[in-house]
Amino acid sequence: MASTNSFPVCDTVEIDPHMAVVQGQDKSPLETKSEKIIAVVLDAGATFWRDSSGEAFVTIPNEGRIERYPVRSRDFRNLVLLLYGDAHPAATKGGGTRPGSASQHSLNDALGAFEALALRGAKREPRPRLCRGEGNEVWLDLGGPDWRLVRITPETWQLVGGADVPLLRPSGMKAMPEPVRSPCALQAFRSLLNFGSEHDFRLVVAWLVAALHPNGPYPVLAVDGEQGSAKSTFCRVLRRLVDPNRADVRAVPREERDLRVAATNGRLVALDNLSALSSEMADALCRVATGGGFGERQLGTNGGEFVVYVCNPVLLNGIPSLLTRGDLADRAIALTLPSIPDAARRTEAEIWQNFDAAAPGMLALLLDGLALALKDAPRLHLPRLPRMADFAKIACAAAPAFGWTTNDMLDALEQNRVGTVAGVIEADPVAVAVQGLAEQNGGWSGTASELLAAINRDTPQERQRERGWPKDSARLSGHLRRVAPALRRAGVEVAQTRTSTARLVSISAAGGREASSASQRHTPIQDGMTL
């Protein structure tokens, strides 16, 4: 088979695949099956590369496609067997031929040689679904059987038959809709889902654009609502639009390690029907969304550690609000879905039929928004960056693709943040008690022990017996640090200082940043870019 490889290979090993090399002996060409396997794969145009941990990967043309696999994956082993079987057919008793076969030993020898080639190859960082190219372009794997990609640049996007990019396909990945521009795409998508407001709709669209952006951090999209408000369907629609998977949504993992596995094997982490989030899982989700490392002992070693860095968009849904912790809420977009009247309900078949019709146009529109964000977000200037500053810049830069202004997007972000802050305070009994103390007296100061005694006097005994209620001044001080940002945005300033003898706490009701800014109008955008 003639080589069709057109990819540049860095630091490759020069070998003669048609000559066996056995120390101390001269062997005739192509004497062993392992050497025949190596020759067939190299003649097909395969190139080998590695990641930062030394795992081997291959990019190989196959029937007009450009495919990419881990060298030790089942899919690549099967492809090697097919290539070898076609190149070396065996005779049958009837005078015909069948594909040739290779022993497990020969195949393992060949795979070992491929791993050696990869160690001399280029070092790259494999990703599922999308990655950034060598320039400013973004590559998106549609996941279809033709292995087609979308190349997105700051000017436009286009479908590409194939390219040598480090995009892999985990076993759960499914094909995305092929993008096709449609003038009614936004309206068709809007009618699919149960949005509570136009602001919510704009934030969801912005979140989808960010989910297609190769660089985080990303906001957590947390969807809540009463039973029957179509929360799971809402999340499955979003997942199938930008990262369809055999398990579109899944249960909350039991361990942080399982969360890491989900993050490395898919673009989105989508968790369904949560009743609550432990503090440990909330912290882990923050690390996934904003970017963080996960480490554990490497199997087969005494002291080795396996470390992986992940940064993924996160999607959650549940009946109660899932943003009770301020650190997670600060990184989140909160949506509450309204109830659906029985007369307005639709069957699953109808919903997915409408999705199939709307998805190609909506994906094309999201790609238009992403191209605009790649172009304008780096030079976009906002007068005050919110907590999710990177997301805010992407959302505002992409807004014109959907017919919205930068101020429209800022208003949506501001309103959502005010509602999220209120939800965090309402869910935290200490924050409620401190806010009540500030509202009653206009201010308070004293030691942490005196503050604990003051809020205990106004808090029912059954609430004080709850697990999260602080039992001493040290725990109260730590709790105040967690809720201080939310209280500040609600108009309550909490300051802590330490002297040689005590912790001092000062509480003042001075008007919060969120409360005051919500009523202000944004300065008009000049030339679409600078405030």
Image: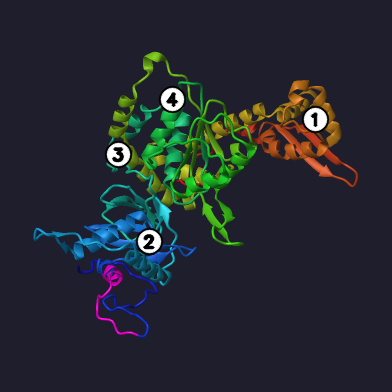
159 to the left or right of 426:
left
According to the image, label 3 marks what residue?
A: 360
259 to the left or right of 194:
right
Crowdedness near tag 2: few (<14), some (14–19) or many (≥20) residues, C-alpha within 10 Å: many
- Say if the magenta span includes residue 30: yes
According to the image, label 4 marks what residue?
A: 230
In the structure shown, which secondary structural element does the residue marked by tag 4 occupy? loop
In the structure shown, which secondary structural element does the residue marked by tag 3 occupy? helix
According to the image, label 1 marks what residue?
A: 443
Report the Cα–Cα distance between label 1 and label 4: 44 Å
Amino acid type at circle 1 is Gly
What range is drawn magenta here?
25-39
Amino acid type at circle 3 is Pro
Q: Residue at x 74, y 30 (%)?
A: 469
According to the image, label 2 marks what residue?
A: 71
Residue 381 visible from this viewpoint: no
Q: Nearer the viewer, residue 156 or 426?
A: 426
Crowdedness near tag 1: few (<14), some (14–19) or many (≥20) residues, C-alpha within 10 Å: some
Report the Cα–Cα distance between label 2 and label 4: 42 Å
Question: How are the residues colored?
Answer: rainbow
The reply to whether the C-beta atoms of the residues labelled 3 and 2 are less than 8 Å apart is no
Q: Position of residue 378 (x, y in %)?
A: 48, 53
In primary-sequence order, the first of circles 1 and 3 is 3
